[in-house]
Image (tube, rainbow, N blue to C red):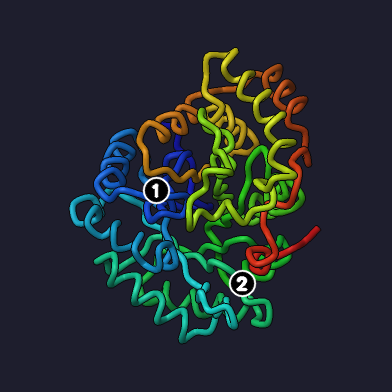
């Protein structure tokens, strides 16, 4: 697979990583054995960067990873996160004590003594990022984490953070229907030697070969609360999505492959982070790392899905509380 640096001076990893949120039912029921098979096949196909969080399934994603890491730890660049509490009255906690407790719990759940890349999952607005960086640097000095990552932050936050210590990666949602990183985060990452890890590059499944049907979203499916899937916006979005899917089909490719290829073509410091529990979906995602889109194809994609084409914001009110707004 195409390889890219995970931050300036960081390890080389596959240009497509594997997210684990889907393994614990975020988009519907998940099967443990199927998820483990997906991990194994992804690893054999060159995916060596696995991403999780302590809040995915309230720790269940990390527990699932533990059984896989027992025999494959030396081949995997492992990432996890902290900073979200799931307490509606105090949803984000970046205090040193909370982060310490979260890190120790993650290490225990995954059965490891070291996490290669450890993210602040959400920045607590009231706490200076400089203080949070000092906590993360202590973890690094202790050998419990290898590198520091930040998630859903503004470019200004990254600039303040790197004044304290190096940041290897920034996670932001980035795809053909969520392009905000182009307004600053992408450039700030490049200027400061950080990888941009683009999560949901297949647009919460909208660029899959079989598009989701919001009417069939089950209990616990995160997308049910996202405005782009509601009864007003989805029919409008579907029109352009079908045109894009037809374009991919005309080129004998899946829309997911084209969507991943588009993300990777935006800059060489971008790593795509799709999540799927099904290997057939991941094969299409990984195909995107093999494609080199022509300028004519890029122009055609831009004509079908220009910046800002999607109807509705990407998050509803509750989920909008954490990501930093900068434009």
Residue 170, x across and y down, in percent: 58, 57
At a point 68% along the width and 48% down the height, the residue shown is 230
At a point 58% along the width and 53% down the height, the residue shown is 224
Could you say which disc has been placed on residue 8 in the image? none
Badge 1: residue crowd in 10 Å (few <14, some 14–19, many ≥20): many
Identify the secondary structure beneath mark 2.
Answer: loop
Residue 302, x across and y down, in percent: 74, 28
Identify the secondary structure beneath mark 1.
Answer: strand
Q: Is residue 270 visible?
A: no
Instruction: Report the side of 30 relative to 272 (left or right).
Output: left
Q: Which residue is mark 1?
A: 49
At a point 48% along the width and 25% down the height, the residue shown is 290
Q: Which residue is mark 2?
A: 123
| Front-most of residues 249 and 317 | 317
Quadrant into which the N terminus falls: top left
Q: Quadrant of residue 40?
A: top left
Q: Quadrant of residue 65?
A: bottom left
Q: Is residue 48 visible?
A: yes
């Amino acid at each position: 697979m195409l390889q890219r640096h995970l931050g300036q001076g960081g390890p080389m990893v596959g240009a497509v990583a594997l997210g684990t949120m889907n393994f614990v039912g975020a988009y519907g029921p998940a099967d443990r054995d199927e998820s483990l098979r997906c991990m194994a096949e992804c690893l054999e196909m060159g995916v060596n960067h696995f991403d999780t969080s302590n809040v995915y399934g309230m720790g269940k994603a990390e527990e699932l990873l533990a059984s896989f890491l027992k025999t494959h730890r030396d081949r995997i660049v492992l990432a996890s996160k902290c900073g979200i509490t799931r307490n509606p009255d105090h949803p984000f906690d970046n205090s040193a004590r909370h982060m310490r407790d979260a890190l120790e719990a993650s290490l225990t759940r995954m059965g490891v003594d070291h996490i290669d890349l450890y993210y602040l999952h959400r920045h607590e607005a009231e706490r200076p990022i400089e203080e949070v960086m000092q906590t993360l640097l202590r973890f690094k000095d202790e050998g419990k984490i290898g590198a520091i990552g930040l998630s859903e932050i503004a470019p200004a936050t990254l600039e303040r953070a790197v004044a304290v210590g190096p940041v290897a990666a920034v996670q932001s949602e980035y795809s053909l229907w969520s392009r905000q990183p182009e307004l600053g985060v992408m450039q700030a990452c490049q200027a400061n030697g950080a990888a941009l890890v683009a999560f949901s590059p297949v647009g919460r499944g909208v660029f899959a070969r079989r598009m989701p049907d919001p009417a069939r979203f089950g209990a616990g499916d995160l997308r049910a609360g996202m405005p782009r899937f509601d009864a007003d916006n989805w029919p409008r979005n579907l029109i352009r999505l079908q045109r894009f899917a037809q374009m991919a089909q005309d080129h004998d490719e899946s829309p997911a492959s084209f969507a991943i290829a588009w993300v990777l073509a935006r800059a060489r410091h971008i790593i795509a982070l799709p999540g799927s529990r099904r290997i057939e979906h991941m094969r299409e995602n990984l195909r995107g790392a093999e494609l080199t889109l022509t300028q004519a194809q890029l122009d055609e994609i831009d004509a079908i899905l220009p910046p800002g084409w999607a109807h509705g914001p990407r998050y509803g009110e509750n989920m909008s509380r954490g990501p930093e707004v900068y434009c």
